[in-house]
Image: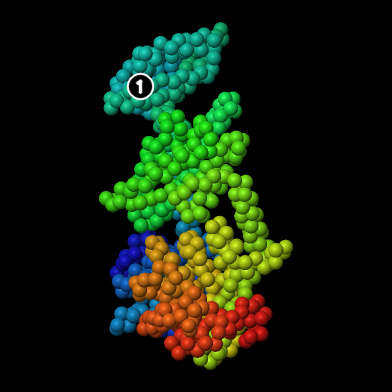
Amino acid sequence: MKTDSLDEASIALGTTPRDDALLPVGRLHWDARTDRLSMCDDARRILRVEPEAEGDHVALLTLVRRGQLGGLRTAWLEALESLQRRVCLDVPLVREGGAHQHVRVSATIAYSPGGRLHHVDAAIQDVTERHQLADRLALAERRLDEAQELARVGHWEWDFSRRKAKYSSQARVILDMAPDASPDLYQFAGTIPEDQRTPIVEAFTTAIAQQQTPFRYAYHRHGADGRRRDFHGVVKAQYVRGGQARHLFGTIQDVTELSAYRERLHTLSYFDPLTQLPNRAMLVDRIRLAMADATRDGKVLGVLMLDLDQFKHVNESLGHASGDDLIQQAARRLTGALREHDTVARIGGDEFAVLLPSVRAPDALDLIAAKLLRAFESPFRLLNRDVFVTTSIGAALFPADGDAAELLLQHADAALSDAKSSGRNNIKFYSPQLTAQASARLALETELRHAVEHGELLLHYQPKFDLTTRRLVGAEALMRWQHPERGLVSPLDFIPVAEETGLIVPMGTWALHTACRAAVGWNTDPSRPVKVAVNLSARQFANGQLVETVCEALAASGCEPQWLELEITESLLIDKRSTVRDDLETLAVMGITIALDDFGTGYSALSYLIHFPVHTLKIDRSFVKDLPGNHNSAELVKAIVSLGRSLGMGLVAEGVETEDQARLLASMGCHLAQGFLLGRPVPQAGFDALL
């Protein structure tokens, strides 16, 4: 929002300053030079904060409702970029206990002559009640609109004694009656197409003769535009003594949309909307029928599971529209490569399944699968360019590999996973060993969930030293799992599972809180600051709440931002989401150090170092281990050190294990290191002892 005055800013939000003139006003003052926040008593009462919270703007950020901080941050940065002097924002907060609060902030921004932010004066008001009233009003209006839209029902009456009819205006619209049409029952019958009229009139007559009430009928007709319309009616008859009908009360409803919805629902239930191929539900039905036929005739049937090997890359580089185009082209190739009585189904995403109801032997199934691989040898045409995409295939046979449809699909999927892990673009058949591996993987996932919930995780800290003085300057927090039966489980075993399942997000949150608390205990002496480094996963950026999570960890522990370092990998810097850069910049502005882990092993590009707020490069241990004897490794490390120093970045060497390595790195200008020479990862108590 960009405005030139407070009045204009308020109007842009849909209110005027007079609306809240009687509400208490609190005053805030933030000095950008000293990063000091002060507030009056009214402001503290509105925000419900204690006097000792004054000056801690990070703590105030934790009050902002989850998912809203990003949008407010964007509006604030836009205001600063355009040197706005007055801004009015409604800020959604959440109180302790979960209660929601809305605060209106009317800010006056002062800049130094060079355009840098100098200070901000703000007036705040609690406008929660006004927001609640607006929400209730909007809900009532929405429900009324939905009722009017969904009803589309007309009513009519017929009086037998007076031989008169009445039609509501909506009934006339539905029946397509002219405004001056004769209001009688015969006119109503005339609205029913002639080819359907006789059975409906006979049904009316029979129902009245048998004193049925209510009774229903349905018909359809084509409008002037040629489109078919479907109608449904309900009639209730009122009878006098003796059984003679006295009144008819009826409703008529245009159910065209409902009929189309039912048809659409049937289609969605059994067909994939993108490719028009059968979906999983229809495939399972067909497999069951084919299994019954194969059992009766003593035949063998095969099931193949396929997915596209480069689909994610296409989506990320060419966009989702190209991804959909690729899926449709792949569906046509698969269908064209198979027999008419075979079934190709889209299971979801980039995954397909094929039912082959009659195969003579595994060799025949292998030949068909190889034919499908060849169907992907020619390039796909996407955005006027040739794109090569291969497929991986898993195969299972009935009855050898399963006697139920879902079990057969499960086993073919296990074989597909084996094909993908074996290099892709190949075919693998199911074997019982694959089920055992999948069971072990599932057991590990279940136990890891239990570990997260029951506090089996812990952090070990690898010391980080200054190579020149050998002074301890920090630590990298490394996650460990103390399993009650297995003992310490290797991170190489459980971190990939955590990444794949999303458990890395709550685990990462726990690690941030735990490491921040440890850093507070280490930094009792201001003259010897000790920084803790915590690794971040790309998954933690995906939900848009990383900044809030970090702020909560700092506020809950009392940790200063300058005591915290966040380590990211190079793969994150090529993420197409703009929020990744925004989040990193916000964290950097707070005073948190951003370190690039394993530098040189991934997607190294100078542009990433220039456009992202990276403060530290960590030289991967694969380059350090061959020092000092390997000339190429030495030259590469020297180049990384030179690059980092020229960009004003800190440098940390990983995996330092010998004095020769330490001396060479120090002579090159890399002054920080971690590794077994200097200290192995230890629990917090062991690290405390090092201090």
> What count of labels does the image hold?
1
Within 10 Å of disc 1 (Cα), the crowding (few <14, some 14-19, many 20+) is some
Q: How is the image coloured?
A: rainbow
Q: Position of residue 570 (x, y in %)?
A: 43, 69
Is 598 situated above or below 229? Answer: below
Q: Image quadrant for the N terminus?
A: bottom left
Q: Residue at left 45%, top 29%?
A: 341
Q: Position of residue 548 (x, y in %)?
A: 50, 67
Q: Amino acid at mark 1?
A: Arg
Judging depth in this view, the residue of 336 and 71 nearest the camera is 336
Q: Position of residue 469 (x, y in %)?
A: 53, 92
Q: Is residue 38 visible?
A: no
Q: Image quadrant for the C terminus?
A: bottom right
In this rendering, would 628 be left or right of 643?
A: right
Q: Is residue 113 visible?
A: yes
Farthest-out residue, front: 363
Farthest-out residue, right: 485
Q: Residue at left 57%, top 25%?
A: 297
Judging depth in this view, the residue of 312 and 194 nearest the camera is 312
Judging depth in this view, the residue of 666 and 225 nearest the camera is 666
Is 12 situated above or below 656? Answer: above
Judging depth in this view, the residue of 501 and 175 nearest the camera is 501
Q: Position of residue 226 (x, y in %)?
A: 29, 25
Residue at the spot of label 1: 221
In this rendering, would 418 be left or right of 176?
A: right
Label 1 element class: strand
Farthest-out residue, top: 242
Q: Residue at left 28%, top 27%?
A: 225
Q: Residue at left 57%, top 86%?
A: 472
Is 52 situated above or below 46? Answer: below
Locate residue 241: give its quadrant.
top right
